[in-house]
Amino acid sequence: HVTVTVEPSLQVAPYACQRRTPLDHPNPALVMALETLAEAALFAGEEARGLAFTRAASVLRCLPRALQGTHELSGLPCIGGHSHRVLQEVLEDGVCAEVEAVKQSERYQTMKLFTQIFGVGVRTADCWYREGLRSLGDLQSHGTRLTRQQQAGVECFEDLAVPVGRAEAEGLACLVLDAAARLLPSASVTLAGGFRRGKPHGHDVDLLLSHPEEGREVGLLGPLVAWLEEQGLLLYQHSQHSSYTTTAEPSSSCGPLDRFERCFTILRLVLPATGTGVRAWRAVRLDLVVVPHSQLPFALLGWTGSRHFERELRRFARHEREMVLNSHGLYNMRQGTFLPASSEEEIFQHLGLDYIPPTLRNA
Ligand code: ATP
Ligand code: MN
Ligand code: MN
């Protein structure tokens, strides 16, 4: 007789913040195809289409096993007709013609290059593309006007294209903690961003600065940045003052931006000693964010990512719970009150969600 092994059917919750999404997963080729189309749509200014592809890719990221065929897609959320066709092609042929064409296109390659420059978004990159610019050399030969930030981004381009390793990120966190603790005893430094999700590499280092006594963190950033400057470690910085007020209407509609005091920098990362003649440092991007103690769990949740996980948490809060979540707090619209939390776990509890640890937020 014949033995048939039936794979357990795939079940996926509709919001990414209800799912456990590890860094490594069994469907990389399918995810890559959809994420390339998502990126291309964003490069074309088509945000809704980009989001649709991102959502579909995120569903595939959380599957516990390789997709066997398109018959398995019917029970899954967020897979639209276009995504379905792309997945079918990759499953059958190994590649999708549309995705390959996008990757080969001058438009996609140039937009990818320009948006990789620190301080350059889709709009600027699009302007440059339409002016006929195609390379970093073109920016210079056309005398394109750059902001101070973009200037620094172009100058450090090659260094910043090299991923930051986990050990390097932890080294920087220690350096900043030592300096912060000298200026303000008991100051804390938390490594957030992709590294907190378990990524071995990142495009930058995201650090949250705080102090266990509310209010003591105020005034820390200026002297800290000045110290980095004195050490000759600062290649670029721009700071923003805190614009947070408790009277402000809570909002998650202003995008991922928050109102913490912060400093975006390019730092000189000192490298382990090597032979003579070898440069002893490399430029890396470091973001410093100053957070009052009572907001730390919200800031930690907001700065750990992934970007899609954050977007989904906020959408879930608003549409399923009538709450507004951002990096400062959680606001219950029906009761008109803020819900305090002393840990990320408590925020998930307030939202009625199972706790998802950072390493499973790679949505
Ligand atoms: P990578 O490893 O490539 O750095 P990442 O996941 O750390 O990836 P980042 O762009 O560094 O990505 O952002 C980390 C998190 O911090 C994101 O989830 C994002 O929501 C949040 N974040 C980044 N920039 C801002 C900002 N200007 N304001 C508020 N939140 C931000
Ligand atoms: Mn980061
Ligand atoms: Mn960052």
Image (cartoon, grey):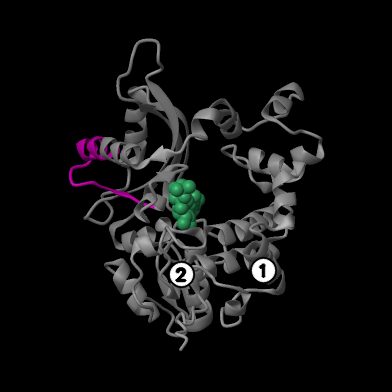
Residue furthest to the right in view is 131
The amino acid type of the residue labelled 1 equals Gln
Callout 2 secondary element: loop
Provide the secondary structure element on which disc 1 rests: helix
Residue 181 drawn in magenta = yes
Task: Please indicate whether residue 326 sits to the left or right of residue 49 in the image.
Answer: left
- Residue 307 visible in the displayed image: yes
**Is 166 in front, or is 329?**
166
Amino acid at the residue labelled 2: Arg
The percent position of residue 69, horizontal first and vertical second, equals 59, 73
Residue at 32 percent across and 56 percent down: it is 292
Q: Which residue in the rendered view is the most extreme toward the front?
A: 1
Q: Which residue is mark 2?
A: 65
Question: Is residue 270 toward the left or the right of residue 55 in the image?
Answer: left
Q: What segment carries the magenta color?
A: 176-192
Looking at mark 2, is its residue's CB closer than 8 Å to ligand 1?
Answer: no
Residue 307 to residue 73: above or below: above
